[in-house]
Image: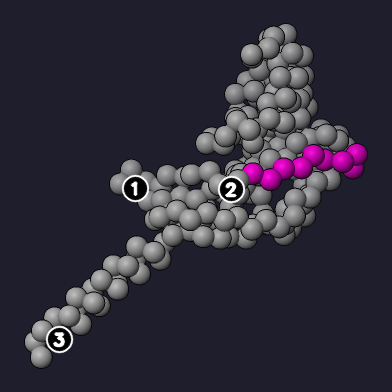
Amino acid sequence: MQEKSIRWIYGTIMAAILFNAVGPCTITHKYGPYYGKVIETQTGEPVEGAYVLLAFYTEMFTFGGFVGKFVETRDATTDKNGEFRIDAYRAWAFRFPHRWVKNCEVTIYKPGFGAFPNNASLVPEYVPFYSIPTNKHIIVSLPKLVMYRDRLNNLHSLSPVGIPDDKLRYLDRLIEVEEKDLGLGSRN
């Protein structure tokens, strides 16, 4: 009888360990949809050709805090009315012991304009400040940058962290356009 009790206790402990180990694994998470309009801060006019990049991450807790790991990106470019739409996206990843970061990280950029959300002249509009709300039409205003120094400083706020280069090709092309316009030459 005692041996049966020990097996039952051992089995219960092992099941609890297994449940706790698999429980925080990330498998799938639905994001979006995201849609809105990008306007110029001073005039309120639509900004055509602004690039909207969304990045999705998982995270795990470490003794130093949470550490994120890239999963995927989705992107769009604004039309002549400054409108963009990124349909709902179901992300898949199996990572132990990660969990999904519930908000995407967003970068909105067009050469000659302050980048959202990291341009120094922008006030955070959404919480958390690096994201945009899901399933809600938003308006993001980008300041037109005319001073060389402002445009140069803006370039430093553009590179999202942890995203593979192949997912940043279009953003890199836009940055190269800005660098060329500023007389900085090619990065290659």
Q: CA distance from mark 1 to mark 2?
A: 19 Å
Residue 6 picture location, percent across and down? 13, 81
Q: Is residue 160 above or below residue 178?
A: below
Please say whether residue 75 is one of the residues in the magenta stretch. Answer: yes
Could you tell me residue 168's position as x and y percent? 65, 32
Q: Nearer the viewer, residue 112 or 58?
A: 58
Question: Which numbered circle lies on residue 4?
Answer: 3
Q: Nearer the viewer, mark 3 or mark 2?
A: 3
Is residue 20 one of those drawn in magenta?
Answer: no
> Magenta residues, as a range?
73-81
Which of the two discs, 1 and 3, labels the residue nearer the N terminus?
A: 3
Tell me if mark 2 has few (under 14), some (14-19) or many (20+) residues whose alpha carbon lies within 10 angstroms of its own.
Answer: many
Q: Residue furthest bottom?
A: 1
Residue pictured at 77% horizontal, 14% vertical: 181
Q: Is residue 176 above or below residue 23?
A: above
Residue 105 seen from this side? yes
How far apart marks 3 and 2 lie (CA) works out to 48 Å
- For residue 138, say whether it is visible: no
Image height of 96 relative to 117, above or below? below
Q: Amino acid at mark 3?
A: Lys
Q: Residue at x 83, y 34 (%)?
A: 49
**Which numbered disc covers residue 62?**
1
Relative to 140, say whether 31 is above or below.
Answer: below
Instruction: Looking at the picture, tell me which residue is in the foreground, 78 or 11.
Output: 11
User: Which mark, by number, is residue 56?
Assistant: 2
The numbered disc on residue 142 is: none
Q: Where residue 48 appears, x then y in whole percent?
A: 86, 35
Percent position (x, y) of residue 12? 25, 78
